[in-house]
Image (cartoon, helix red, strand yellow):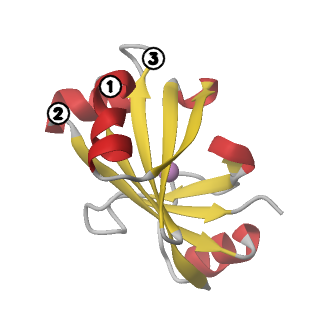
């Protein structure tokens, strides 16, 4: 069902302050910034091999990422696994009794379709399913 880790999401207070570490010090391939209005975040993607790092900067105080930072500080926010068929993956998880934040896929950054598993079911690790654009 899962094909690989697509990206790791990291909550930051400022993309501009954080990008130089990943792009310049670690030498990752910077793939641009995109605003995801629905999630009230600006997202920067950086590539490392087959995987990516997704930096998430809240654009509003009531952004879920702003609330995360308030509670936990900046740092790792979620792990995203790639799936070939997100509707099928959600159906398998629901059938196994897994609670979903999103029972239907929604729009993620860079043309992806995503769904989050409820942290109660994923033992505290916010877990995203991610179907890449085709
Ligand atoms: Co993500």
- In the visual, does 58 lie left or right of 75? right
Give how far across and how far down residue 124 sits, in percent.
25, 61
Contact check, label 1 and label 2, Cβ < 8 Å: no
Q: Residue beneath label 2, please? A: 71
Who's the residue at 17% across and 33% down the image? 71
Who's the residue at 63% across and 54% down the image? 114
Question: Residue 66, which numbered label?
Answer: 1
Give how far across and how far down residue 59 sits, in percent.
45, 17
Relative to 12, residue 29 above or below: below
- In the visual, does 72 lie left or right of 2? left
Q: CA distance from mark 3 to mark 1?
A: 8 Å
Residue 12 at least partly seen: no
Give how far across and how far down residue 131 sits, in percent.
69, 64
Task: Out of 116 and 58, give the one closest to the viewer.
Answer: 58
Question: Residue 83, which numbered label?
Answer: none
Q: Quadrant of residue 91?
A: bottom right
**What element does badge 1 sit on?**
helix
Q: Quadrant of residue 74?
A: top left
Question: Residue 59, which numbered label?
Answer: 3
Circle nearer the viewer, 2 or 3 = 3
Give the mark nearest the N terminus, 2 or 3: 3
Give the mark nearest the N terminus, 1 or 2: 1
Q: CA distance from mark 1 to mark 2?
A: 9 Å
Query: How many labels, in total?
Result: 3
- In the visual, does 129 lie left or right of 11? right
Task: Out of 41 and 48, give the one closest to the viewer.
Answer: 48
């Amino acid at each position: 069902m899962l094909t690989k880790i697509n990206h790791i999401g990291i909550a930051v207070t400022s993309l501009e302050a954080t990008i130089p570490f990943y792009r310049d010090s670690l030498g990752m391939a910077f793939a641009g910034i995109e605003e995801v209005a629905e999630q009230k975040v600006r997202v920067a993607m950086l590539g490392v091999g087959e995987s990516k790092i997704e930096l998430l900067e809240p654009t509003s105080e009531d952004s879920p990422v702003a609330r995360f930072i308030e509670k936990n500080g900046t740092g790792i926010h979620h792990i995203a696994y790639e799936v070939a068929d997100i509707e099928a993956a959600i159906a398998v998880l629901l059938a196994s009794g897994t609670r979903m934040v999103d029972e239907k896929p929604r729009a993620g950054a860079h043309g992806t379709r995503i769904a989050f598993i409820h942290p109660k079911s994923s033992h505290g690790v916010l877990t995203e399913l991610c179907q890449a654009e085709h």
